[in-house]
Amino acid sequence: MEWSQIDSWPLSHASRRIDGPVHRWHAQVTGDGPTLLLLHGAGGSTHSYRDLIPLLSDRYRGVALDLPGHGFTQLGARQRSGLRAMAEDVDRLSTQEGWQPEAIIGHSAGAAVALQMAMSDAGKGKPPPKVVGLNAALGEFPGLAGLVFPIMAKALAAMPFATTLFSTTSANPSRIKALIASTGSELDAEGYDLYRQLVGDKSHVDGTLKMMAQWDLQPLLRAITDYAGRVDLIAVSKDATVPASVSESIAGKMPDAAMHLIDGLGHLMHEEAPSAIADQIRRILHA
């Protein structure tokens, strides 16, 4: 996304452009109090927290980022879109900016980045932040999809015209509604239009494909049984992208983790029902 478009983006009054480390970042900083770092999922941006952040800003300072190659964050290195590299770069950015999050809230793949960051802190002997996962993508695609999807992502990321073709063919309103519906969620008109803008942007699609192509969850999944930090996973009953059973399984493997089930929402729960999700996050953080 071009920075010239920032004024029309949700919560643009809180937007900041930050040079380095590695990338040219877009961050939104609001509120006062203990810091909550909010990370979106693959293909998303800060816009997904547009209604949640104001609900938490009475008690917390919210820091939302566009992950590398997503939204308004410009990639500074093409090979740093994988899980470990993203976690390292977000951690370095937090250190540079003096952000010391009490908790990291991650949606979908953003929850994996959050957990990777917390585990890295624990490995360095630092007190790790709490991790709150929203429909956390902490499982591999089953069966043939687990083999085919990464190969397709790598192939598309390497094709010079693939992102332009995808953006051109996928960014019409009816396709966007169908894409969102396939996750089990329903959005308002603004929500659909924001995703239309993202899918229609070549650099954003390119960044998403690079993230998918470089993603490797297995080292994290092998290590979680030894991680003793606090992890809360909020899952929903209608998620057609990451079933609630994924959060239930992961929570059962960790020493200090819990799964919280909310009925009737889909994968984009925090966009569908921000008040309900904000209430659940407050209960978790105040427990």
Image: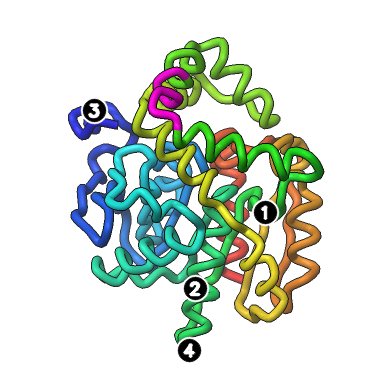
Q: Is residue 43 above or below residue 283?
A: above
**Location of mark 4 (residue):** 125
Q: Earlier in the sequence, mark 3 or mark 1?
A: 3
Asked if the stretch drawn in magenta spans residue 42, the answer is: no
On residue 136, which mark appears? none
Q: Which residue is found at the position 36% from the left and 43% from the top?
A: 69
**Location of mark 3 (residue):** 5
Tell me the magenta residue range.
Answer: 159-165
Query: In the image, 257: left or right of 101?
Result: right
Labelled pair 1, 4 in contact (Cβ < 8 Å) = no
**Location of mark 2 (residue):** 129
Q: Position of residue 118 (x, y in %)?
A: 51, 72
Q: Position of residue 239 (x, y in %)?
A: 72, 38
Indicate the secondary structure of the residue bearing disc 4. Answer: loop
Q: Which residue is found at the position 45% from the left and 71% from the top?
A: 102
Give the amino acid at mark 3.
Gln
The residue carrying pointer 2 sits among few (fewer than 14), some (14 to 19) or many (20 or more) residues within 10 Å by Cα, namely many
Query: In the image, 13: left or right of 32?
Result: left
Q: Position of residue 24 (x, y in %)?
A: 24, 50
Q: Which residue is found at the position 35% from the left and 66% from the top?
A: 33
Q: Earlier in the sequence, mark 3 or mark 4?
A: 3
Query: In the image, 204: left or right of 148?
Result: left
Q: Quadrant of the C terminus?
A: bottom right
Asked if the stretch drawn in magenta spans residue 162, the answer is: yes
Q: How many marks?
A: 4
Q: Residue furthest bottom?
A: 125
Q: Which residue is found at the position 54% from the left and 44% from the top?
A: 212
Indicate the secondary structure of the residue bearing disc 3. Answer: helix
Q: Is residue 176 above or below residue 80?
A: above
Q: Position of residue 63 (x, y in %)?
A: 36, 56
On residue 234, which mark appears? 1
Question: Which residue is more in the foreground, 215 or 129?
Answer: 215
